[in-house]
Image (cartoon, grey):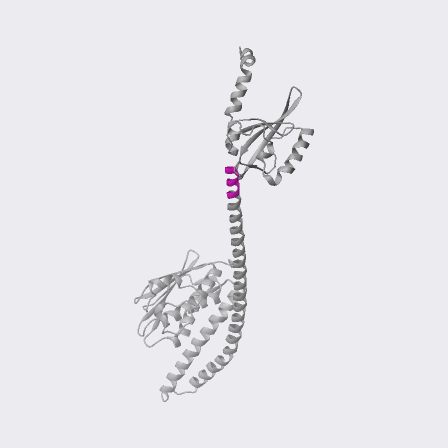
Amino acid sequence: MLTTFREQDHARVCGIMFQTAAEGLVVVDAKGLIRLQNPRLAELFGYKDEELVGQPIEKLVPEAIASGHRAHRDRYLEKPQQRPMGSGLELRGRRKDGSEFPVEVSLNHFEVDGERFVMGLVTDVTLRKRAEHELAATLSDLEARVEQRTGELRQAEHNVREALERERELNELKSRFVSMASHEFRTPLSTIMSSVDLIGRYTDDARNEKVGKHVDRIRGKVRELTGILNDFLSLDKLEQGLVACHPAPFDVLDLCIGLIEEMRTLAKPGQAVHFDHSGEVREACTDRQMLSNVVSNLLSNAIKYSPEDRPIHLRTAITNGMLSIQVEDQGIGIPEKDQVHLFERFFRAGNTVSIQGTGLGLNIVRKYLDMMGGSIRFDSREGAGTTFFVEIPMTSESPH
């Protein structure tokens, strides 16, 4: 049945396909004349039906390449071969009104009664080319933006590196200056302290009460300056990695009693440090000098930021291998908004601007405690006082 259909209607079916094809179809003879065209081809090029029949195929080619097209057509007819659509050639067609548009052309050849013909399938690719151009433009724009952004990031990275290098150099210069200045000041301060001690020793306080008061005041101020210089030197050594933790057993009570005695000259009138040690265990095993620096710093802060006639409490305990220390005062307290920054280097709370200080002490305290494997926290209310809580594990080895 199918065979019978093909035999009877083959020509009619082919004709219908030719006439209704969605792409332009054209048949050209060996002389380059158009012998057949379908309606879609006429529509693509702006001609009426059958208007192109008998016309040279170059009528559909841009004038600038028409002569070259003839030579190309002749060479193709000498050695005809199938050329599929989109074979890499950039082709353009010429409409009746002279306008041009991009096309793709697929070629195939055949013979009828010994005469050679070439059939071309012509597709208008205007929309596709436009989309390709838009895509290419978008990609080019994106590449340009990426390149620009990459350049900006590289410049920013360069600027950051330069800034970091300048900051590093400045920090090194500052550290050298602080170290040098601190060492240079220590010698005259030691001389002043020795002289003050001699004056106090040879002064009869009963007859020279005023002299004795001035001696104590000088001694206290010298110790304040010495403490400031020690803070700078300690920070410099810590930042250079020159400090190591050396745990060893020692008596906590002896240490604390000695520190309280040293703080006596810093105390304001009516201030007193009350010391209480809980439990029978007195021996601690950690770095004695680091712990001394921690406790003396907390005590000096309590004295500095508390008014006259207010008590200061130092409490210690050793339980379950943990040394606990509390330093409580009834001083000015720490504003809530400043508490998060309290351990930052050079930070000072807003209510301490009229009180002498460097803002280094608590930063150094935390660094020492980190090296000892300890911790510090505090509870404070502005105007009511502050309590610092320190915990240090007892160990025979340094964690750092």
Residue situated in front as seen by the camera: 252 or 385: 385
Q: Which residues are magenta?
A: 126-134
**Is 159 rendered above or below residue 300?**
above
Residue situated in front as seen by the camera: 73 or 172: 73
Q: Which residue is drawn at the image coordinates 46% and 62% (left, top)?
A: 369
Q: From the viewer's perspective, tell me whether residue 151 is left or right of residue 258.
A: right
- Report if residue 127 lies within the magenta region: yes
Residue closest to the far bottom: 207
- Residue 145: % across, % down: 51, 51
Residue situated in front as seen by the camera: 387 or 283: 387
**Is 209 rendered above or below residue 2?**
below
Q: Which residue is drawn at the image coordinates 66% and 31% (left, top)?
A: 76
Q: Is residue 278 visible?
A: no
- Report if residue 108 lies within the magenta region: no
Helix, strand or loop: magenta stretch: helix
Q: Is residue 41 visible?
A: yes
Q: From the viewer's perspective, tell me whether residue 330 is left or right of residue 121.
A: left
- Residue 189: % across, % down: 48, 80
Residue situated in front as seen by the camera: 211 or 178: 178
- Residue 13: % across, % down: 53, 18
**Is 381 rendered above or below residue 227?**
above
Q: How many marks?
A: 0
